[in-house]
Amino acid sequence: MLSGILIFNQKGENLIFRAFRNDCRPRLADIFRIQVISNAQVRSPILTLGSTTFSHVKHENIYLVAVTKSNANAALVFEFLYRLIVLGKGYFGKFDEEAIKNNFVLIYELLDEVLDFGYPQNTETDTLKMYITTEGVKSAIANSATDSSRITMQATGALSWRRADVKYRKNEAFVDVIEDVNLLMSATGTVLRADVTGQIVMRAYLSGTPECKFGLNDRLLLEGDNMTSSLGGRLDNATGSSSRRKNKTRAAAGSVTLEDCQFHQCVQLGRFDADRIISFVPPDGEFELMRYRATENVNLPFKVHPIVREIGTTKVEYSVAIKANYGSKLFASNVVVRIPTPLNTAKTVERTSQGRAKYEPEQNNIVWKIARFTGGSEYVLTAEATLSSMTHQKAWSRPPLSLSFSLLMFTSSGLLVRYLKVFEKSNYSSVKWVRYMTRAGSYEIRF
Amino acid sequence: MAMNKIRGAFTAPRKGETFELRAGLVSQYAYERKEAIQKTIMAMTLGKDVSALFPDVLKNIATSDLEQKKLVYLYLMNYAKSHPDLCILAVNTFVQDSEDPNPLIRALAIRTMGCIRVDKMVDYMEEPLRKTLRDESPYVRKTAAICVAKLFDLNPSMCLENGFLETLQELIGDPNPMVVANSVTALAEINQMSPEIDALQVTSSTLRKLLMALNECTEWGRVTILTTLANYKTTEVKESEHICERVVPQFQHVNPSVVLAAVKVVFLHMKNVNAEMSKNFLKKMAPPLVTLVSSAPEVQYVALRNIDLLLQKEPGILNKELRVFFCKYNDPPYVKFQKLEIMVRIANDRNVDQLLAELKEYALEVDMDFVRRAVKAIGQVAIKIESASEKCVNTLLDLINTKVNYVVQEAIVVIRDIFRKYPGYEGIIPTLCQCIDELDEPNARAALIWIVGEYAEKISNAGDILAGFVEGFNEEFSQTQLQILTAVVKLFLKRPDKAQGLVQKVLQAATAENDNPDVRDRAYIYWRLLSNTSDSNATKNIVLSEKPPIVSTVSSLPPALLEQLLTELSTLASVYHKPPEQFVGQGRFGADAVQQAAIEEQIQNARENPLAAAAAAAAVTGATPPPQAQSNIENLLDIDFDGTAPASAQKEPTNGMSGLEGLAGTPVRVESPAVGVPASSNNLDDLLGVFGSNDAVPSSAAGGVGVNGGSSNAMDLMNGFAGLDLSSNNAATSPSFPSQGTQPKKTNEDILSLF
């Protein structure tokens, strides 16, 4: 598997070098620096030289590199590198050059723990935090033998994500449904692609070992509820429900079709596959319970009508209208519209009916910011970009206009949390909170 | 603050740093010693040699401070090799630690011992390892399990004698899922190191245990178990069904590598179950595959490469998902290119309009490489879907009208291919001829000239156009020269009155003033044919013979390779679309064996399909000569690691020969034939041949082709001239044949002209 993990800064200085196998030589650091960091031509995240493969990802101002000498599992390698980033963020808040330089001892310790002989072990931040602690807080726990046997039991157990002795005076669970809506609209206004990638983040402050059941207005599940006949085999279930889909449209009104979902490792996948029930013992604190994808009936929160006219070779005129397509009680915040300008723009003049617009030459964008966008309203920007003349006139590629925003209490997919049930031995009552938010994923409009 | 002092170590080294560190390491104050150790590790990371401090660091090994212990161990692992004798001093601590009441320390000790690769240390490992394998703490057991693999790497016989492998096999039945996963990992590793032992035997009872552990262990453990399941050969249909059913829920895992591993298991075992069921599994596979496309770009890239493989086997699985593969403006190029290929693969007559609109959009972007590929994709779609060909041609004409130089050139090349499938579009030829002056790439020029020659009877000014090219014949690339030659001869045969003078002129230029053997040979053959007066139709029959229409310009892997790669899903091999032997270095894959396999495959190929093989051979010469420096680095790498020189280094090319010569002879980098992807601009890629950019074949293999196919290019290779040609960086004199594998037409003519 992995022969070593290397971390570089942007200048190519080697910050961390941890070899897990004999074949990972210090000299490899130089080779990576020469071949990847100082080579502008590289276009692939994977590079094989001789029989050595470097797989790298970039994060903030660092390169994380995995060295392999075998036919390694590439998906696993990259996923692991991303997990390292998550781990780094969990420990240091931000995982960048600064954090690495300040915590290099801890990072070596972590690497020693999460990889053994190049094979990934437990990478759950919360579990690791129990016995690998940040500087200063020398854990008294980890040093006493009984406690560490408990910790190690947990780190390897079937419930490796949860301590057994969690106690809260007030039992609460917060559920955040966060959706990223992706849109690609053509210049003629047809929707080329609209889909939602959602995640459900849970913050569980629950005592003991609670078993939770979580219900959504998932179409398949709702149909399942209404079905009285037995489901038969596991496989028949999926086909069965899709064939019944037509008959059940009325019953399934107000439900959403999830194309696909992924769950945190605490969710019992077998049960979901069999009866679409989301059942789990949550980790303590914040975690991502599930991710999902929906492509049907996507509600687009904003409609954008850009009109862009190139007048001769010296001027471009913009008129961008943006309309909020949600109830007037809601409002979106931090709406930012990025309107591309040609590379040779010399100066711009903008007028807006709401918010402020500014030209950002380094990005080749006019950035229009609207702090608060009430539902149903429509705002317009008109702008004019004056172009400097260039000796070599090249056509402007017209990159798409893009939007970012966040909108509370709105889900583009129409997803709703129907229930969250908590079962625990002591039978305490718990309080649950649900919050919905829709953000812009890649919200692009061509013009 | 301690923190600032640590940071200080990143600045320029002070004088006598080693001295200072040593003073710190033997200081009477614990905190100073610890700080010195930290600084030592820091210096080690920066690549400084601090091995001289070995004895002093070692003095700090016996400590109750876990963090300090870890640092000392880290140091030990790095420098044990340079001080094997001193390592003995640490043994005692290790053995003691392995019996510590604290499981974390026991695990740390056994983990580190396995990483100190010194023979003397190995001798002392036996006892602690035996104990820790039976430890009460699963954390220690799972660490010890991996340690067996480490020990096996160092001393296999010791592992076997002590029965550690049997213990590992028992651990597969451990109640703790992580211990199970690590035992499987260790056994799989050992199995890979020496397959003859057959360490990882999966029986139906182990299978049950694995399936049990699958639902409980960590995500990484799941990948291990799933990989093992994928390699397992089932004995009966029921078993395959059972495995698939148990694995399908893993499609919903959040970790993409688990999802891919699960896809692999189901895909491989699906073959054994009945059609109805496997259709169902395929249906369930589609949504998770699509979800992978929204993961991080690097993971996405791996997923896309794998989807490409799956689609070649099961073209229908993502039929309705075209939109998902639309390129985002900010996608990295490697993702965009891959998405393009996949879009072409899933194009059908229902989604083709959408696809064309999208491709046209891409063709107007700025990234030249991407634009070219988009244009090429339009051509591929036209050839793939007959009903859409007209729309495609219209789109291409629109693009030609943009007058953007590289778009026009690529479009012409693409249209040439379209003519080879649908000869009926001659109406657009006048438009094409208008851009003659803008074409400066040999490929595009050659394409246009081919079109002119092919339709000479319908183009009234064909003579004038060709006359222009003949005028500058000697300045053209040989690829273009060949086409001029052929086109003029075709024109002459079709309209003898117009081209009498021209044909003489061009034959004269090609034989007397040209030093390229290919051009000369072809000219001589034409000359001989034309001077054959006994049968005036013979020449026509040969030169103007009906050519078989091309079927597809979408590259696809040979079936045998595809089958092999499907068993390698999610690995590097699946990303490169190359069998692992080609990049995994020597190891236990004997260099000879690999070369032998390559030759056999080549011969087999040649037997089945002489044209394609010949084309592949021809393409060798089209590969870009890589810079010498890079091949050196690569060789250095291998020398560095294995102590022995790799095959490529042994015949390290002398002065005139670049690394590519080595490439042709090195089994490690044998390329698969018939992968016709356009040459990428990245030399490094070409050199490594791992991106499917060029169709290099080993020279010896090409020799076999030469005998069969009789292509002149293959003969060149056989005679060993290829190396010389390749090494010349002067593009004007080196033969640059079309580097597309999809060029049977040209080779076709080659062969025809030889007979």
Image (tube, helix red, strand yellow):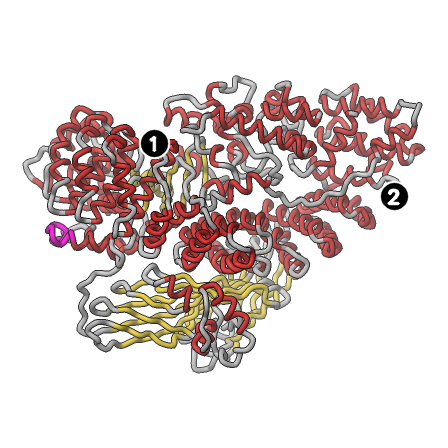
Badge 1 local density, few (<14 within 10 Å), some, or many (20+)? some
Badge 2 local density, few (<14 within 10 Å), some, or many (20+)? some
Q: If the image is split into quadrants, where does the C terminus of chain B sit? A: top right
Residue at 75%, 28% (x, y): give it: B751
Q: Position of residue A65 (x, y in %)?
A: 37, 42
In the image, residue B460 sits, relative to residue B467, either above or below, namely below
| Tag 2 subunit | B
Question: Looking at the rendering, which quadrant does residue A436 occupy?
Answer: bottom left
Rendered image: mark on residue B552: none
Please tell me whether mark 1 or mark 2 is closer to you in this view. Answer: 1
**Residue type for callout 1:** Asp
Q: Which residue is mark 1?
A: A23
SS at mark 1 in the image: loop
Q: Is residue A143 magenta?
A: yes
Q: Is residue B2 left or right of residue A99?
A: left
Q: Which residue is mark 2?
A: B458
Q: Is residue A409 magenta?
A: no
Q: Are discs 1 and 2 located on one and the same chain? A: no
**B548 and A313: which one is in front?**
B548
Q: Is residue B428 left or right of residue B157?
A: right
SS at mark 2 in the image: loop
Which residues fall within the magenta stretch? A139-149
Q: Position of residue A269 (x, y in %)?
A: 38, 62
In the image, residue B661 sits, relative to residue A392, either above or below, namely above
Residue at 30%, 70% (x, y): give it: A212
Residue sitting at the far left: B28
**Residue type for callout 2:** Lys
Q: Are marks 1 and 2 in contact (CB under 8 Å)?
A: no
**A58 and A244: which one is in front?**
A244
Q: Position of residue B109 (x, y in %)?
A: 18, 39
Question: Is residue B264 something one can see in this rendering?
Answer: yes
